[in-house]
Image (tube, helix red, strand yellow):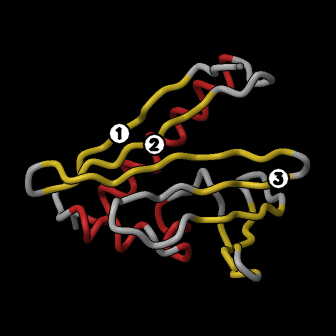
Amino acid sequence: MTIYKSRIITVSIDRDWREVYDFAFIPENFQRWAAGLGRRFEQSGRGWTAEDPDGRLIRIRFSRPNEFGVLDHIVFAEDTETRNAVRVVPNGTGAEVMFTLLKAPEMTEKVFAADATAVDRDLKALKALLER
């Protein structure tokens, strides 16, 4: 059994958690706030394709709509599969969005830190977009 180093990156959003989930769940909306994931999202069968920040084609499979605020997604790029756990939960009258970042074995500390910075930037972009 292997346990990877992890970091939970979170942002509080002053908007009802269901509204945050309903917006963030739509794959086409990801390109409006999740630059770290990609751009040019297109539905492809049961999944989606997009260009990652480096311009490479990736495939993405998103969790199904649910009542629990789960926004998990799996990114398939070249020969790798990255599972991302994302949750939107009630926080008072607002929402808390949490992303669990895992450090893959081949990932350097520098890359892990850069990924954490990118996720933090994306969550802050979501907050700014939804609090307008």
Amino acid type at circle 1 is Thr
In the image, residue 16 above or below residue 99: below
Percent from the top left, x then y, of residue 1? 71, 19
* Residue located beneath label 3 in the image: 77
* Residue located beneath label 1 in the image: 10
On residue 99, which mark appears?
A: 2
Tell me the quadrant of the picture where the C terminus can be found.
bottom left
Residue depicted at 43% across the width and 57% down the height: 70
Crowd rating for badge 1 (residues with CA inside 10 Å; few <14, some 14–19, many 20+): some
Percent from the top left, x then y, of residue 116? 53, 32
Amino acid type at circle 3 is Ala
The answer to whether mark 2 and mark 1 are in CB contact below 8 A is yes
Query: Spatial distance from mark 2 to mark 1, Cα to Cα?
Result: 6 Å
Query: Spatial distance from mark 3 to mark 1, Cα to Cα?
Result: 25 Å
The answer to whether mark 2 and mark 3 are in CB contact below 8 A is no
In the image, residue 130 above or below residue 103: below
